[in-house]
Image (cartoon, grey):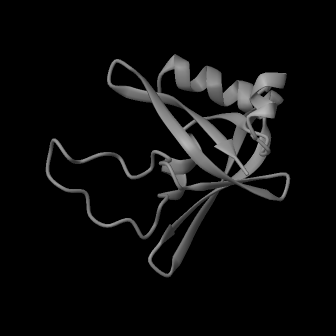
Amino acid sequence: MSDHIDDLDASLQAEGEDIVLRRNIGANKDEVPVRAHVRSYRLNAEELTKGIYKEPSVVIISMTQIRAAGWPQHAPPRPAPPFDVDPGIPVIGDVVVIKGKPKTVKASDAIAVNGEIVRVKMMVDG
């Protein structure tokens, strides 16, 4: 592993919290527990008056626990390049369970250094 991943994993272990990442694939509900940094996304008064009623959060995770668990277990085989996107990267529509509350992934950004994914930053709400 790279120093970037090791540093993130250490930070998540020390200061993160346990969440569950969930993906529904057909009749299967694939879940994996992961450590995460979860931060509320602060809304200003203008955004609140526009009718935003769900509290969005920013969630940062490492791929380490996802890879170790082989998540998602029921993913279809990867297609040939260039369409062979890593199925372990959270996608829009996946669910994270934070403090017992499910939140839907609205955006997911896999951040890579030298071709290796070192962290995933997600915007979730629910």
The residue shown at (57%, 44%) is: 106
The residue shown at (73%, 24%) is: 11
- 57 to the left or right of 93: right
Quick check: 11 above or below 94?
above
Q: Residue furthest bottom?
A: 27
- 46 to the left or right of 116: right
Res 29 quadrant in image: bottom right
Res 115 quadrant in image: top left
Quick check: 85 above or below 25?
above
The residue shown at (38%, 27%) is: 116
The residue shown at (85%, 52%) is: 99
Quick check: 113 above or below 10?
above
Q: Position of residue 40 (x, y in %)?
A: 80, 31
From the viewer's side, name the closer residue of 29 and 116: 29
Q: Position of residue 123 (x, y in %)?
A: 62, 37
Q: Position of residue 120 (x, y in %)?
A: 54, 33
- 55 to the left or right of 35: right
Q: Position of residue 8 (x, y in %)?
A: 63, 25
- 81 to the left or right of 59: left
Q: Is residue 40 visible?
A: no
Count of numbered circles in the view: 0
Quick check: 64 above or below 27?
above
Q: Is residue 12 visible?
A: yes
